[in-house]
Image (tube, helix red, strand yellow):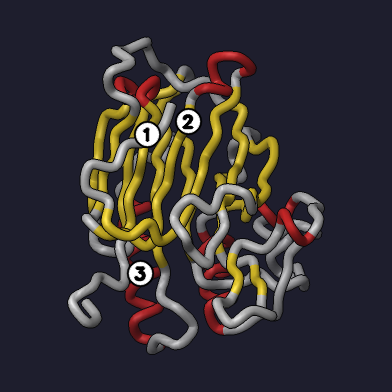
Amino acid sequence: MSNGHRVRGVAIGISSKLQPSVVEVTPVDERIMRVRMKHTLGFMSLVAVYAPTEMRKTEEKEMFYAKLDSVLDQCPPRDTLIVLGDFNATTGTVRDGYELCVGPHGSGTRNTNSSLLLNFARSRRLRIAGSWYQRPELHRWTWYSNAGGVAKEIDHVLVSTRSRILQNCRVYRSAEVFGTDHRLVVATLKLHVKSRRISRGCQGVYWGAPEVKAWFCLDGDAGENRGESRCQAGWEPGPAQGFVMPD
């Protein structure tokens, strides 16, 4: 808490079409949350995170990744694994030693947070989605400083290298619905998620803290038409009681 306001928190939103596929919701703490869902080939574990900033103490960062590792240890090994959110870390452009997790289009200058992210991704055999797609800068930068002049790619979607489901990953600058200094990151996955039609009276479901710094949304619209689902990650909505994801 800072001045009576939360300074961290995560949430996950699920499209109404996909609510019946949710089999487990696990709020871990104010930085980590997990949802498990059924799809046509098995299960998918979605882990939303909000990592400590570069300014935080090394001990806090190491504790965060240790806890994140323990959460992933609890995910069944056959689950399709997706970890996403605000990692407060750039990937850097040098791939040496990290060729499996970082693609040819990384960005930024590597620092302590970068090393923690890359080591985590490598140890878990996770691919950092945005680094595999060449995009113009407007579709790359996920964070802009309030003072202006600084833009970085610090929000990421990580997908298991065992699954060839990743189709695209880019930033949508126009999706500034919460007045945040972050931008919406959307990854398109080729994955059939089991769902059924439910009443239009309920548009979506949201799990998380009353005030969140990072949220995740899975939308099944594309899945019905083309066998694709979209993972969407956004940041800093502020108070969110009663929040529902739009259809």
First reached walking from the N terminus: tag 3 or tag 2: 3
Q: Amino acid at mark 1?
A: Ile
Q: Is residue 87 above or below residue 190?
A: below
Mark 3–mark 2 CB contact (< 8 Å):
no
First reached walking from the N terminus: tag 1 or tag 2: 1
Q: Amino acid at mark 3?
A: Ala
Q: Which mark is drawn over residue 237? A: none
Question: Where residue 48 sits in the image (x, y, percent)?
Answer: 39, 52
Q: Which mark is drawn over residue 66? A: 3
Q: Amino acid at mark 2?
A: Asp
Other-residue count near label 2 (Cα within 10 Å), few / some / many at <14 / 14–19 / ≥20: many
Element under label 2?
A: strand
Element under label 3?
A: helix
First reached walking from the N terminus: tag 3 or tag 1: 1
Nearer the observer, 11 or 43: 11
Q: Which residue is mark 2?
A: 219
Q: Is residue 202 above or below residue 10?
A: above
Name the image quarter holding residue 210: bottom left
Element under label 1?
A: strand
Q: Is residue 188 above or below residue 126?
A: above
- Residue at image position (39%, 29%) is 15
Other-residue count near label 3 (Cα within 10 Å), few / some / many at <14 / 14–19 / ≥20: few
Q: Which residue is mark 1?
A: 14
Q: For marks 1 and 2, give the CA distance.
A: 7 Å
Nearer the observer, 215 or 37: 215
- Residue at image position (45%, 78%) is 53
Count of numbered marks: 3
